[in-house]
Amino acid sequence: MEKRVVEKRCSGEMEGEPGRARTHRCCRRGRDCEECRVCDSGEDSLDTLLTRLPLTPSLSPRKRTTSQSKTEPPLLRTSKRTIYTAGRPPWYNESGTPFNEAFVIGLCGGSASGKTTVANKIIEALDVPWVVLLSMDCFYKVLTKEQQELAARNEYNFDHPDAFDFDLLVNILRKLKKGKSVKVPVYDFTTHSRRKDWKTVYGANVVIFEGILAFANKELLKLLDMKVFVDTDSDIRLVRRLKRDITERGRDIVGVIKQYNKFVKPAFEQYIEPTVQLADIVVPRGGENSVALDLIVQHVHSQLEKVSFGQCSAPSS
């Protein structure tokens, strides 16, 4: 008789056959939780996840989803101190000495690979006073009327380098690295447009920049002190993208899969996956990889200590 897997992960227990998707008992009783995961990425697990996806968008009004629309507090509290995620005035560091340059971490990876989750876990573990999280999603170009129509039909390639305003991105990141305050655009995914109101972001000790093409521009690479590639199985990324685009962005499953096969997957293979060779650290399994996250945090702390004592050498090209 085949051995069953029982694993304590949340308020209930996970159960199921080895090699197949497992769910919590508490979730099966009608309560869902964030901890449900797939035990592997085989076909059975993917099929099981797909059966949970809605086939059509919700009938309720479409949610307005922007690149910086989360209603989060301006600070993040940890067990030891408070991290000001919105940045701070740039003149001094946490030790009171004049501010030099921020340490910039670049996070690259495929769509829905878990880059934002990794970024938030790094912020939480760093436990330094001032950290800024900058998303590449903010820097999509303003679309023409014709491009808007293509986007509405899922026929515009948002995963190509030409879809991003790299000049604006490099200019803003360069200012953040020098500790200057900047205005960052806010992109609305439901209307495929840049909103009129831009967000003010201040300098910080650490800047975390994340995006699917974070390593695709030479000028951008020069600003990154540490390059991290988040490597997640393609099946898991597809399921995450389906769930996100259907439930949050009002898309239908046919349109999402069409866009994935025509643009997302080819762009990953041509522009994103090859840049893994530029990474200083590759993080398999994303935010669940605590060992890799610990290594990143230790390195950042060591670099910040060198800066505090004026021993930080010039970054290598």
Image: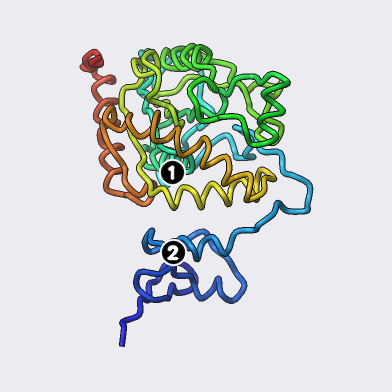
From the top left corner, tell me how far across and down residue 219 is, in percent.
38, 13
Q: Nearer the viewer, mark 1 or mark 2?
A: 2
Which residue is nearer to you in this view: 174 or 281?
Answer: 281
Quadrant of res 55: bottom right
Asked if residue 258 can be seen in this view, the reply is yes
Quadrant of the frame with the C terminus: top left
To which residue does mark 1 refer? 113
> Mark 2 packing: few (<14 Cα in 10 Å), some, or many (20+)?
some
Q: Amino acid at mark 1?
A: Ser
Tell me if residue 180 comes above or below residue 88 in the rendering.
Answer: above
Of pointers 1 and 2, the one earlier in the residue sequence: 2
Which residue is nearer to you in this view: 157 or 228?
Answer: 157
To which residue does mark 2 refer? 45
User: What whole-number distance in Å separates the C-alpha atoms at marks 1 and 2?
Assistant: 17 Å
Element type where label 2 sits in the image: helix
Q: In this rendering, would 44 be left or right of 290?
A: right
From the top left corner, tell me how far across and down residue 244 is, in percent.
59, 47
Tell me if residue 213 comes above or below residue 294 in the rendering.
Answer: above
Residue occupying image coordinates x 63% and y 44%: 255
From the top left corner, tell me how far across and down residue 211 is, in percent.
46, 31
From the top left corner, tell me how far across and down residue 226 is, in percent.
31, 27
Tell me if residue 262 comes above or below residue 275 in the rendering.
Answer: below
